Structures are given as C-alpha cells and as structure tokens.
Image (cartoon, coloured by chain):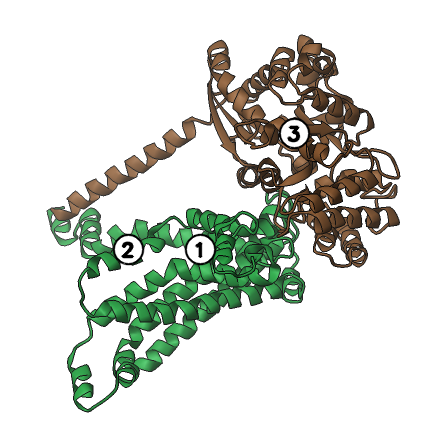
Amino acid sequence: MQHRHAARIAALMAAALGMGTLAACSGDDGESTTLNVTLANHVWTDIITEKIPEFEEQSGLDVVVTQLSEDQLVDNYKVKLNAGSADVDVMMYRPLQVGKLFGQNGYFADITDRVSGAGDWDWEDFQAGPVGLTTYEDQVVGVPMITESEMLYYRTDLLEDAGLEVPTTMAELEEAARTIHEENPGTAGIVMRSQASAAVTQLSGFLYSFGGTWLDDQGHSAIASDEAKEAYAYYGRLLHDYGPDQISTDMSWPESAAIFAQGDAGFWIDASSLYENVYDPAKSQVGDQVGFAPFPAGPDGSRPYNVAAWALGINAASQNQDNAWAFIQWATSPDMTLEIQTEGVPSARTSVWENPEGTESFPEDLAAAIAANGENGVGQDRPLVVGVAEAREIVGAPIVAAITGEDSDQAAEQANEQFEAFLESDG
Amino acid sequence: MTSTSSDAVPISTRLSRWANQHRKWLFAAPAMAFTAMLICFPVGWTLYLSLTDAKGSVRRPADFIGISNYLRVLTDTDRFWPAVARTGVFTFGALALELVLGMAIALLLWRTFRGQRWVRVSILLPFVATPVAIAMMWRLIFEPNIGFANRVMGWLGLPPQPWLADPGMTLPTLIFVDVWEFTPMVAIILLAGLSTLPDEPDEAARIDGAGLWQRFWYVTLPMLKPVVLVAVLLRAIDALKTFDLLYVTKGQGGGSFHEAETLNIYVYGLSFKYNDFGVASAVLIIFFLMILAVMWLLTFRRKGAKL
C-alpha cells in the first residue's frame, strides 16, 4: 500500500508546482493596475513619492516605488533589463551615463509619438539641450526632469575674514583657496571630488574653460592636448596644495559635500542640484554661511557643464506602457514641475524658469549663478560614448595622478593612448 | 483469459513495485535534479558566454570567438594579474594571521576559568555582525580627516595615517578588518577541535618532562591537524571570495588606482560597469578553476596526512 501513498503525494506535489507556475504567469498578461516605478535617491524622488497617493487616487493604479542609490540603480537595471524582465515599468535614469548604452541595447520604449501628441503637457516647453540627451537615434526615449550645472560654493565668512572677493577666474580661485588654506590651519582651501571616475564630471567644466574637449571633431581622444593637460594639472593642484590635509582619492560628492558641510573647507565645486546638502541647516553646520557663484572663467571663459542629470523612461519590455506614460506625464506636468522646482530641484522646463515663482525659493545668488551657467554651459559633463563607465576610469586617471602630486602630463599621455584604443572598440 | 491475467503481472503493479524498491531515489530525484540544474546551468552559461564576444546586453546577438577571451585575460598584466596577486595577498595574509590569533585565543579559552562563557560569547560578536555594516563602520573609523582611528593615533602621539585612502596601506588595512571579523570563527572551530582531544597524550608528555611549547607543537597540534585543515579550507574559500568588505570600503573598481581590486571586484566591474560579459565570464571560469585547485590541494593533502 505504501507505494500508492507515495504516488498520491507525488501527484499532489506536481499539481501544487503546476499551480504555482500558473499563478506566476497570470500577472504578466496585458496591462496591470500595479505600476512598478524605479527611482534614484534624490530630492526630486523624496518630493514625488510624497505626492504619489494623489496619482494613485486619480488613476486607480497601485504604484510600487523601488528607490535605490545611483550605483545600485544602474546595476539593478542591468540585471533586470538584461534578462528582459517586465517588472520595471517607469525607470529614472541618467541620460549622460547610460543613455547611449541602454538605447543601443534596446532597453527603452520609443515614446516619440506619446510626447508629441500630449497637447497641454507641452513637449516643446522642455529645453533643447536636455531633450537632445534623451533622444536616441531620432527616437525620444526619456523625459528630462532634473538639470544641473557646475557651481562654485563658498563660505561667505571665510572669504570676508580674509578680505577676499568672490573669485571669477581660475587664477583668483587658486589665490583665494591658497589664502584660506594658509590663514585657517586645519581648514582646506577647497574640496572637490577625488575618485578617478567620480571626478570626471567635475573636471569637465575646467577642461572646457581651459579650452579643451574630451573628443576632437573626428571623434578621436583629445585628452592629451595642452589645454587638457593644463586642466588636469590645475584641478589636481587645487586639491593637492590647498585640499584637505589627508587627501583621499576615494571622494565622490557625498564625501566632499560632508567636508564642506562640516565647515572644513572654503570652497566646494560640484553640481548645483546638490546645494541642499550644504545649505539646509539640518544637513550642514555652515548653512548660513554658504554663498553660490557661477563657475570661474578660464582662458576660454566660464564654461561649466549644464546638463540633464536625470530623466524618466519606459522599459521596452514593460507590459504596462500606457500606465507608465500616464505616470511620467503626471510627474513632469508643468504644474508639478513648478511645484518641485520651488522646493529646490532645478527643472528642464523653460516656462518654469521664466516664471518668477519658479526661482523665488532659491537663494538669490544661487538662482543668478544657475542662470549664468545656463548661458555659458556645455551640454555634456563626460565623454559621450557607449561605455561611459569604462571611459570615465580612463580619462579620470590623470586627475588622480595630479591630485597625488604625480606627473599629470605623463598620465594624460598614457590615458590618451588607452582612450584612443577604447574608442576604437567602443560600442 | 484467466490464465494470462494470473501469469503476467499487470504493468501498473510492476511499475509500482519498481517504484517501491527505488523509492529513496525517486523521492530524492526532484531535489537532486533541481540542485544539479542550479549548479550546472549557471556554470554552463558562464562557460558559453566566456567563448563569445557578448557585450552591452546578453540578449544582443554575440559571436562565438573561441578562447580569445581567455588569451586576452591571461596576457593582461594591467588589471588581471595584479588582481590575482591582490587576491592572493589578501587571502594568505588574512588566513595566516587568523590562524595564529585564532589558535592563541582557542588555547586561552580551552582551560576553564570564571566568566568563560561570557568571554566566548563576546569574542564571537564581530563574526555575527552583518558584513556590510562592519565594512561601513570601519570605513568611517578609517576616514583620514574625521575618523576615529586617527584620533586614537593622536592620543598615542603618533602622526595621522591615510589608512584606506593610501594605495599602499589599503590592502593591509583591509586585511586587518578581515582578521578582526573572522578570527573568532577560526577560534571557535579550533576550540571545538581542542575540546574533543583526549587528555592522556598530554599527560604522558607532561610526565615525560615536555615543556609548554613542546607539548603544543608535538602533541596537541598534530592531533588537531584535521580540524586546522577544516578551518583553513573554510576560511580560504571565504577569503578568496570576499566582496562585501572591499566593495563597501573602496567602491567599484577598488579605488582610483584599483588598489583593492581583487578578482571578485574586477569581475564585478567587467560585467556591471563595462558590460563586457564575454571577458567577465572568462575571468570567472579562471577564478573558479583557481578555487577548485586550492580546494583540491587542501583536501588532497589532508588525505595524505591521514595515510
């Protein structure tokens, strides 16, 4: 009798397995009322997640938000989208970092018709630079919602004590950093990113202002030009000579912002969208003494980056694209954009910038600096290639060499060769 | 009709009889097949990828390119071999220190004393804490400008050190953290081994006038050898595969100079940053073979020791 018993158990188990599989499949058919939204840690995300219940009520959808830090976000996409997973519908992404790669891999749904047919939502209202970055081979694949430019943050009290004016040129900046460093033992004159690939975006403003570029007109590496070498050396010298006493080569923006926010540095150069980290008294010990200035001018003028930092796209494998689009439209509507910008997140909508309400919550000098950067800005802050992550490591190596006091010219020559080889096989 | 039915046993009965005789295999079969698939599929898929030029997305068409990924990896003196060297230094450095310290702690705890239980529990604490939390804690402690480590150096009148920020000091510092974290595990394994040892040989040696060191070296250690090998095997495999500590303290790529880039971190970078799945798979297969070789060496030597 025992074997009958066994057969019965086996049959039961098989049935249970089958049912499990069926249940797992049933979720994938057609449009679902659950919308999976993946967002990065950002002030924008904090604001929008608070408002999501409004959207849920209005649309009848359940929104499931996954929130990750930048690196984890990209890794998450790479795992899921590589597997063709449909459980990401709306994706927040960095157009400059992964736009080309994901576009080439076919990860993005084409939303050209959706944006141009959206009427009052007004696609024409978005700034041309950011829109260029969210367009892949003539297809619109994303809606830019956060812009940023390279900003000079300074300590008003330290500058005043030293009798200094706000620097407007590279020479003045170096002089001011030197003075502050000398007059305040233990305080760095300036702090900036020092990790090889993280620092690349911040170097870009220096590179452009010294007259350099990442790639020349023929698409070849231009990082060993005299201008580029000068930019590398200057960036490294600032940190090596006037940076924190124990200079680490692992600093990205959280580390450098922390040093500035603790009152341990006179200047900080980084993205404008990060200003809350040093300005908000809850996060910064020097919130009252932070000043904002446009990027200082080099031999080629003041040429900071001014880019679309983040955009929203739709996963090409999503079964829920209509609802995903409804969410994007809601999150980037003119009213919502205005509301979010008044809480401190610079947007990509022209109408919001033209509306006095759009900038009244910013500190006055911040709004002025962003406006000035907008006029002079360059629309990219890193080499526009497919393998951006690898390229950043290569072109970032001379920065670290300069910071640690090594020969950055030689490092630039070496990086130039590697970059040239990389460009040949890129994509 | 009646004769045939009584002669030949119906097929269903024969089947169930067979099933009854082999039921231990039948019952285990689904689980075994599942486990085999879980092991074989990823290894097989990685092996396949390592022979192609898959890049960008694994769903894009890739060409079969034979062993050229392996050739590229094995001739790469820029990233691959330094990563192998760092993996070796980290593993053997950590392992050696952990064995010596673990043995010392195990010997101390072997003899009974008051409050022994408390000491045994508290010594295990670093080992039971979450590795990522530990790594973040040490990263803050070793922060060169505001970290606690340099404050302690100040109290001792020593100059501040760059710790994890200096390429030359990174690996030793990371080995220190690993030793801090995993010595308790080695100590516990060794202690378990020590407590099963018979007292007689030690007593005999004592009567024969052997000193403390002699008793340890010639009596206790040889008897403990199988346990030591188990500890070495477990820790070696674990240390070779260390990822959390390195990733949390130094990030992707193991720092600006790749100073903490072991094989694991390198492969992570190849696949997640460079999306170079073919090359990443080739490195993984080579790494897999290396770990197999280490395991084989250790178990082979253990058998030799028993003979």
Labels 1 and 2 within one chain: yes
Position of residue B191 in the picture relative to residue A422 (left or right): left
Chain letter of the green region: B
x and y percentages locating residue A139 in the rendered image = 72, 26
Circle 3 marks a residue in which chain? Answer: A
Q: Which residue is drawn at 77% across and 29% down?
A: A294
Q: Residue at x 65, y 38 (%)?
A: A105
Q: Earlier in the sequence, mark 1 or mark 2?
A: 1
* Callout 1: SS: helix
Local crowd size for mark 2, using a 10 Å CA cut-off: few (<14), some (14–19), many (≥20): few
Mark 1 or 2, closer to the camera: 2
* Residue B94, quarter of picture: bottom left
x and y percentages locating residue A307 in the rendered image = 73, 30
Labels 1 and 3 within one chain: no
The answer to whether residue A383 of the structure is visible from this angle is no
Give the residue at mark 3.
Answer: A290
Q: Residue at x 66, y 52 (%)?
A: B63
